[in-house]
Image (cartoon, rainbow, N blue to C red):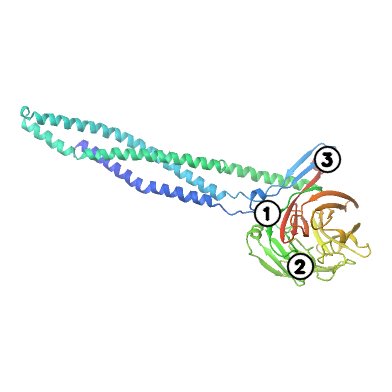
């Protein structure tokens, strides 16, 4: 075969490779675009591991201020969200798609360079062929003036090259198609880049690392802060709507890191089944739970889960029981001497709420009333292992006039009611054995509070409000320890 025909063979081989690459790669590119974008839009379920709702707009925060006695330092702490970004899957898929498109773009550019180089050669050859054809026609017209042998040789060469002309036309069309594909890939890259920017995926890993670092620093800062005084309560965040009008729900403030189980107890008497949800997310989105049967029914809604055990008031008695979930057995029980029970000294809403057990940063507490204190509230600090009273404080606030109460940093806060407009209006400090009247707004969204407890780990109030499980963020005023300054 002559040298020009050999070059044309190389060109045809290159065209075959281009056609094969186009048939396999570009359709998959279109399919990849459709599949990945659809998957990215599908989202990813929230992996929330704290007390937060899945919706970031409903997330709660803790605002805390700190100042020493001389006013030298003011520190505002915002407790971080305990949920991770819900766009990890979408961001990863989008990034992988962009990388593949970029790789395709590079391949298209290399192919385009080769095609343009070969096209220049083909166009040059096309000119030569057409010039040869013209010359041959001229020779054919004046064949009498040429030697017969030269005429036959030229005509034979022309017949050999003539079939290449339509091939060259197809090659030019394929070269235009390659250019078109190149422009389409560039457009796709631009669209994906804009989409990535809208999703906020640029420098995502760096942003994620900065957020994680900030979480660690804020947690360390919170650990250094001493207890604070309640100065505000946020609007309620409804976590779930379930159960009857009365009940209690909680998480364990001493649970290990990553343990976000939710404990749920419907009703205020004659029930002994406790539901365990494996996470706050499960509690919010499903009815998958494990049921634990207590050896005795509980009384009221003043139960609390603390360090793997549930503490509750045995129905129609002043006995406190500690039930260990790990062994499914009673580890301790003890009478709370002189405490009223069986609706003797309940909260204003009734419901056998005579004895209210609660925890704060200092440990386990019991709030109740006695005849000896004329039905006024008594606060007792309990040993969580033996249930013995460590110390008690008597107040001047009637138990039956209290809507609900909760402990924060050794101070008992009491609401003025349980329905309608509600405020936190009374505070008794066990640290100073003094009380004061305060005025802190408290939004009673569903008009009937039958349980209100503080969780020191989450720094949030858990409430059962007329068949709704609700969270409130609290604002505390902190005084930094002098050794931390």
Circles 3 and 1, Cβ within 8 Å, touching? The answer is: no
Which residue is at the front of the view, 256 or 303?
A: 303
Residue 260 shows up from this direction: no
Q: Secondary structure at mark 3?
A: loop
Residue denoted by label 2: 323
Q: Secondary structure at mark 1?
A: loop
Q: Residue 330: percent from the left, percent from the top? A: 77, 70
Residue 156: image quadrant is: top left
User: Which percent across, then down, holds residue 411?
Assistant: 85, 53
Which residue shows up at 48% across the image and 41% down it? 191
As drawn, is 373 to the left or to the right of 439? Answer: right
As drawn, 224 above or below 407: above
**Which residue lies under the disc numbered 3?**
68
- Report crowding for label 2: few under 14, some 14 to 19, many 20 or more residues within 10 A (C-alpha): many
Q: Are dots 2 and 3 in contact, CB under 8 Å?
A: no
Residue 451 percent location from the top left of the image: 78, 60
Q: Nearer the viewer, residue 48 or 207?
A: 48
Q: CA distance from mark 2 to mark 1?
A: 24 Å
Which of the two labelled residues, at mark 3 and mark 1, occupies the earlier sequence position? Answer: 1
Query: For mark 1, does the 10 Å Cα neighbourhood hold few (<14), some (14 to 19), or many (20 or more) residues?
Result: some
Q: What is the count of numbered marks?
A: 3
| Quarter of the image with the N terminus in it | top left
Q: Nearer the viewer, mark 2 or mark 1?
A: 1
Please give the label number shown on residue 50. Answer: 1
Q: Which mark is residue 379?
A: none
Mark 3 burial class by Cα count in 10 Å: few <14, some 14-19, many 20+: some
Q: Quadrant of the C terminus?
A: top right
């Amino acid at each position: 075969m002559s040298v020009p025909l050999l070059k044309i063979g190389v060109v045809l081989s290159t065209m075959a490779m281009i056609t094969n690459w186009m048939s396999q790669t570009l359709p998959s590119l279109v399919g990849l675009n459709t599949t990945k974008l659809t998957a990215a839009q599908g989202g990813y379920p929230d992996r929330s591991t704290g007390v937060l709702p899945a919706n970031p707009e409903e997330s709660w925060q803790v605002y805390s201020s700190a100042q020493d006695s001389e006013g030298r330092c003011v520190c505002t702490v915002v407790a971080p969200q305990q949920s991770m970004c819900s766009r990890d899957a979408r961001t990863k898929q989008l990034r992988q798609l962009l990388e593949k498109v970029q790789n395709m773009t590079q391949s298209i550019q290399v192919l385009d360079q080769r095609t343009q180089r070969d096209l220049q050669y083909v166009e040059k050859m096309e000119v030569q062929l057409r010039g040869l054809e013209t010359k041959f026609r001229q020779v054919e017209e004046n064949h009498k003036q040429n030697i017969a042998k030269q005429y036959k040789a030229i005509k034979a060469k022309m017949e050999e090259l003539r079939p290449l002309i339509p091939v060259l036309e197809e090659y030019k069309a394929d070269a235009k198609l390659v250019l078109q594909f190149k422009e389409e890939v560039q457009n796709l890259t631009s669209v994906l880049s804009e989409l990535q920017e809208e999703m906020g995926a640029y420098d995502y890993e760096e942003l994620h690392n900065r957020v994680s670092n900030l979480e660690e620093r804020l947690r360390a800062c919170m650990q250094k802060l001493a207890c604070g005084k309640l100065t505000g309560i946020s609007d309620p965040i409804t976590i779930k709507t379930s159960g009857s009008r009365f009940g209690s729900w909680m998480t364990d403030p001493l649970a290990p890191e990553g343990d976000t189980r939710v404990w749920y107890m419907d009703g205020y008497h004659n029930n002994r089944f406790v539901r365990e949800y494996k996470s706050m997310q499960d509690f919010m989105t499903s009815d998958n739970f494990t049921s634990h049967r207590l050896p005795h029914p509980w009384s009221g809604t003043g139960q609390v889960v603390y360090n793997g055990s549930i503490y509750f008031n045995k129905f129609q008695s002043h006995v406190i029981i500690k039930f260990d979930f790990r062994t499914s057995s009673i580890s301790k029980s003890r009478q709370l001497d002189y405490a009223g029970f069986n609706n003797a000294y309940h909260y204003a809403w009734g419901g056998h709420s005579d004895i209210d057990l609660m925890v704060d940063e200092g440990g386990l507490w019991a709030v109740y009333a006695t005849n000896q204190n004329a039905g006024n509230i008594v606060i007792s600090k309990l040993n969580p292992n033996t249930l013995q009273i460590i110390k008690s404080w008597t107040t001047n606030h009637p138990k039956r006039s209290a809507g609900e109460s909760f402990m924060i940093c050794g101070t008992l806060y009491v609401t003025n009611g349980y329905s309608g407009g509600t405020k936190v209006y009374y505070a008794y400090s066990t640290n100073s054995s003094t009380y004061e009247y305060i005025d802190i707004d408290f939004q009673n969204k569903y008009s009937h509070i039958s349980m209100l407890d503080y969780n020191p780990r989450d720094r949030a109030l858990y409430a059962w409000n007329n068949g709704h499980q609700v969270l409130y963020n609290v604002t505390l005023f902190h005084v930094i320890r002098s050794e931390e300054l």
